[in-house]
Image: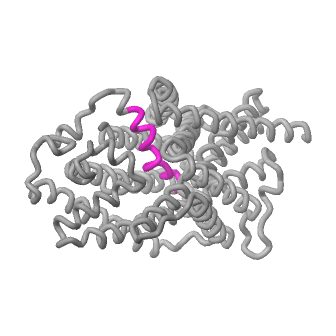
Amino acid sequence: SDIWPGVLLALLVAFLTISGFSELVYRYPLAGSRSAYHFAQSVFEEFTSAGSPFWSRPAKLVTGWAAHLFYWVYPGVLVAFMATLFDYLARQLGYHPTLFGQVLLAFAFAAFIGFLALRGITGSTTSSIILNIIQITTLVIFGGLAIVFRLANINTLAPQTWQFTSLSDIIIPRSLNGVVFQAAIAFFLVSGFEATAALGAYSANPGRDISRGAFLALMIQGVVSYLFQYLAINLALNSSFFNGAAPLQAAAMSSAPLGDIAIKIGDGLLWNNGFALMIVIASAVVISIMAAMLTAINNGVRVSFAMALDAEMPGIMGSLHPRYATPYVAVVLISLVSAVIGSIGVMGGAAALLGFTLAANLGAFALYAIICILAVLPTPYTRTSLKRALPALLGAVVNVGMLVSTLFIGLRLEGIALQATWLAIIVAVFYFAVSLLVFLLRRKQA
């Protein structure tokens, strides 16, 4: 019930985080090409040239752990989303895939995107613009239909039938814990804006242009694609969509509640063409997940590649394919990990999928906090004014606050939320143990 203010809070946290990336892009425009870890490496190199402090290696360890927890879990969640979506579509067409079939879908999708990443396919700017226009147009049209459905009330539904009685009922938070925990989940929607930092080397004014690009991306993604959509869908949400059941509880039981809602709205407003509307929206979602998955794998590979070049990971992670010049070992490994996470997300249901989502977001909060701290950290060769440092410092505070609050609130909840929180903690500890083991092995070799 606090999903709209939760998405808004997640968006505000992302906006504050931009300042940290902008400051580092301004100082190290070439570093962003190898993702967030390379910013950390650039900062630590300044200290190393002047005498490496005792905390530099542990700081690298924590940075690498956070980066891998975020970038290596995120693609797996997307694989689970795609497998769930195809399972839903198959059931709408009369087929009923078994659990084994869903796992095969997860592995097939991970392998397909991994193959594209292996060949170095990232998509052109023109194709990205066209796809974004198609997706946003589809979402805006659907959001408009949802609003019309509520205003026209063609089924003459009683006031108590609607989940939210008014616009203010959607926007005004009900509880602080609900908003924060919802934001911790919704952060999955707005994370990834730091990919614009990879363009720093191609920008005439990186400190200005990259921050503007990230800000514009968040405005389009967060405001148009999410805040507007959740507002419209919540306005239309009612018990008639789910045969009289409580809307939020019934939606939680559906593998694809947006598809169910689209069918009902389409049948009501588009002369019983709800199934066609659902297929159109599903097509836009498929395109979106594929593009996000490819970007996520490329980001994850860049992290491992940068750490391999920094001698913080085995050198084989930096091995390039003889034909495509891509880090093929890292691509294969992250694709396999994504398939496994996606399969567990499909088999484990909502608790597993939510747990992996929270785990990825915990990594994002930790990594973004570190980036913001590095942006304000005085180095032997760089000083930052208080005016420039204040936004990044605030970004570090809110990211740490989100990390701590998510765990504190999640462990106090019950049911799926509690199970998901424990799974997120287990995944985070596992990744940290692996990172620590690699760190100790590399140190012993050195």
The magenta stretch is 180-195
Residue 9 location, x and y as percent? Answer: 36, 38
Closer to the camera, 94 or 237? 94
Picture layout, residue 412 above or below residue 51: above
Residue located at (43% from left, 50% from top): 189
248 displayed left or right of 166: right
Residue 434 location, x and y as percent? Answer: 75, 40
217 displayed left or right of 232: right
Closer to the camera, 336 or 213? 336
Question: Which picture quadrant has residue 442?
Answer: top right
Residue 25 location, x and y as percent? Answer: 55, 49
Residue located at (27% from left, 32% from top): 173
Quadrant holding the N terminus: top left
Closer to the camera, 76 or 122? 76
Q: Taken as a whole, is the magenta stretch helix, strand or loop?
A: helix
368 displayed left or right of 267: right
